[in-house]
Image (cartoon, rainbow, N blue to C red):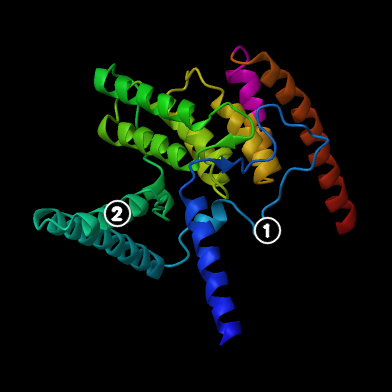
Amino acid sequence: MFVQNQKVVKTLVVSFVVSVLAGCNIDPVWKTNQVRGPDMNKPSPRPSQPIGGRDIAVAQPSEVDLVEDAVAKRQAYHTALSDLQHYYADHGYATKESWARSELESAMGIRQFRYLLDAEIPSAALTASDSIAEADAMYEKGLEIMKKAGHGIPGIFSRREMLRAADVFRKLIEQYPSSDKIDDAAFQLGTIHEEYLPNQEILAAKWYERAWTWDPHTPHPARFQAASVYDFRLHDRDHALELYQQVVSEEPELVPGNTRFATRRIRQLSTDRKRRTVRVESSQE
């Protein structure tokens, strides 16, 4: 009996500590090295499983059905919690109403994946062209949330608040797809996915690509950031080489340090590619 009581007490203590930590808005930095200015002497972190375009491609039609089912059930869960909260509020059950509200807020704060790339990333056919005041305001709101969440401050950030900022940027693109701020929002989404959300490098790269696809003259170093992700995170060096070449030709004046780094990396990757070619040719002889 004494041993059982010890186990119960231990379980309650662990649950209490977890609940306290869950309420903290400060998260440790997931990324160990900033990609803006990679140190090639340091080994870049490798994921335990391959992460890339192949991983998120649709494997078979049944996946679409499963994703649609998950999305529908997720929405049903949120709706049920909302209905429960309103029921308790209407009937004067203040404590239970607060429970339902808290659970709904927690559920809504979870990063919700759409799992299919076409659903995660909007069409490349959009064009950043129109000046729309509402979109401008949303973009500034997203930047402000990012700043308060710790963007640019090494060591600590709030993942929950970063997700809030990402939601604002996504809504901007969805609600104002012709706004001249969609490329800016896409770049910030790339930054959030790259720097603050684990195992989402491919989404970061795709958002960066949308930034210059939607506005070829975007003021952000999107090509360089995408090249760095493909180079050091996804280890797709051939695609990284192509993007570094675009940095030199399309972004030479944005960040001079990026251009110098890209030029140096082009030489290194080109040399590596030649060596691989020679090895392959030698093995075939």
**In the displayed structure, does residue 28 sit left or right of residue 186?**
right
Q: Nearer the viewer, residue 60 or 148?
A: 148
Total numbered badges shown on the rendered structure: 2
Q: Residue at x 67, y 32 (%)?
A: 34
Element carrying mark 2:
helix
Q: Which mark is residue 48?
A: 1
* Point 32% across, 56% down: residue: 103
**Side of 218 relative to 92 (left or right):** right
Q: Nearer the viewer, residue 54 or 89?
A: 89
Residue 258 position within the rendered picture, expressed as x and y whole percent measured from the top left: 67, 21
Residue 155 in sight here: yes
Residue 14 position in % (x across, y down): 55, 64
In the rendered image, residue 3 lying in the magenta stretch gets the answer no
| Residue under label 2 | 104
Farthest left residue in view: 90
* Residue span colored magenta: 244-253
- Of label 1 and label 2, which has the lower sequence position? 1
- Separation of marks 1 and 2 at Cα, in angstroms: 32 Å
Helix, strand or loop for the magenta stretch, by majority: helix
Question: How packed is label 1: few (under 14 Cα within 10 Å), some, or many (20 or more)?
Answer: few
Image spot of residue 231 (x, y percent): 69, 39
- Residue 224 vs 48, above or below: the answer is above
